[in-house]
Image: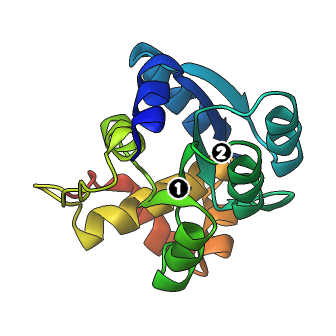
């Protein structure tokens, strides 16, 4: 990171969050505000692009898949408006190809959901020469599966039958999973 970008990162803490999962958006917005960022929240690509057109923020956290398009369009527009801006991409559908594309489009990091607010801050404020540290206690595969099931369950307004259909799972199997405690 050059000296100008470092000074900007210290003084301008404007942050755009573009996320279509409303509960996650609200939690992340509150968490980032408590960490000193001035947060603007959007839940669509078009709203994010409109905000960037008015005032490009210093930082952005963008979901990869949004209801009205691809979050990489927001990252690309931000980098065109403000080349020193630092953006990270969040997704629940992580794979190597989209991570490479996100970095080529200008994202500084790529995190999978559910991401902790501290991980987001560390990714946003990391100096380019710093490598993101691997988590000391990463989530187990069982925990990641459980988190995904819970997210779909909430999206379906806690409707077991609809959740089971969307997950291509038998309803009784889903009920057994939901009745258990979260794995570690």
Q: Is residue 101 above or below residue 114?
A: below
Q: Position of residue 143 (x, y in %)?
A: 29, 62
Q: Nearer the viewer, residue 181 or 126?
A: 126
* Quarter residue 145 falls in: bottom left
Residue drawn at point x = 47 percent, y = 62 percent: 148
Residue drawn at point x = 81 percent, y = 57 percent: 67
Q: Position of residue 168 (x, y in %)?
A: 61, 81
Q: Is residue 182 above or below residue 98?
A: above
Task: Answer with left or right where residue 55 lies relative to residue 119.
Answer: right
Number of marks in the rendered image: 2
Quarter of the image that includes the C terminus? bottom left
Marks 1 and 2, the one that precedes in the sequence: 2
| Numbered badge on residue 77 | none
* Quarter residue 49 falls in: top right
Task: Answer with left or right where residue 173 lies relative to residue 83.
Answer: left
Q: Identify the image's colour scheme: rainbow, by chain, secondary structure or one colour.
A: rainbow
User: How far apart are labels 1 and 2 at the CA level?
Assistant: 12 Å
| Residue underneath mark 1 | 90
Q: Nearer the viewer, residue 21 or 171?
A: 21
**SS assignment at label 2:** loop
Q: Is residue 98 above or below residue 82?
A: below
Q: Is residue 51 above or below residue 141?
A: above
10 Å neighbourhood of mark 2: few (<14), some, or many (≥20)? Answer: some
Q: Position of residue 68 (x, y in %)?
A: 87, 57
**SS assignment at label 1:** strand
Residue drawn at point x = 59 percent, y = 33 percent: 58
* Quarter residue 128 falls in: bottom left
Residue drawn at point x = 64 percent, y = 62 percent: 64
Q: Position of residue 93 (x, y in %)?
A: 54, 71
| Residue underneath mark 2 | 21
Residue located farthest toward the left when viewing the structure as drawn: 136
Residue located farthest toward the front when viewing the structure as drawn: 3
């Amino acid at each position: 990171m050059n000296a100008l970008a470092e000074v900007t990162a210290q003084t301008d803490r404007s942050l755009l969050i573009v996320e279509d999962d409303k509960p996650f958006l609200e939690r992340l917005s509150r968490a980032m505000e408590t960490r000193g960022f001035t947060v603007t929240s959007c839940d669509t690509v078009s709203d994010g692009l409109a905000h960037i057109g008015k005032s490009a923020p210093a930082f952005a956290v963008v979901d990869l898949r949004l209801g009205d398009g691809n979050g990489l369009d927001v990252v690309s527009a931000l980098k065109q408006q403000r080349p020193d801006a630092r953006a990270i991409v969040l997704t629940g559908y992580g794979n190597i190809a989209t991570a490479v594309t996100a970095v080529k489009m200008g994202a500084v990091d790529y995190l999978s959901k559910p991401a902790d607010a501290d991980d987001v801050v560390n990714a946003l404020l990391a100096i380019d020469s710093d490598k993101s540290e691997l988590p000391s206690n990463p989530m187990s595969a069982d925990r990641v599966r459980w988190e995904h099931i819970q997210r779909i369950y909430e999206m379906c307004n806690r409707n077991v039958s609809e959740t089971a259909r969307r997950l291509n799972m038998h309803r009784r199997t889903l009920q057994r999973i939901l009745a258990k405690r979260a794995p570690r």
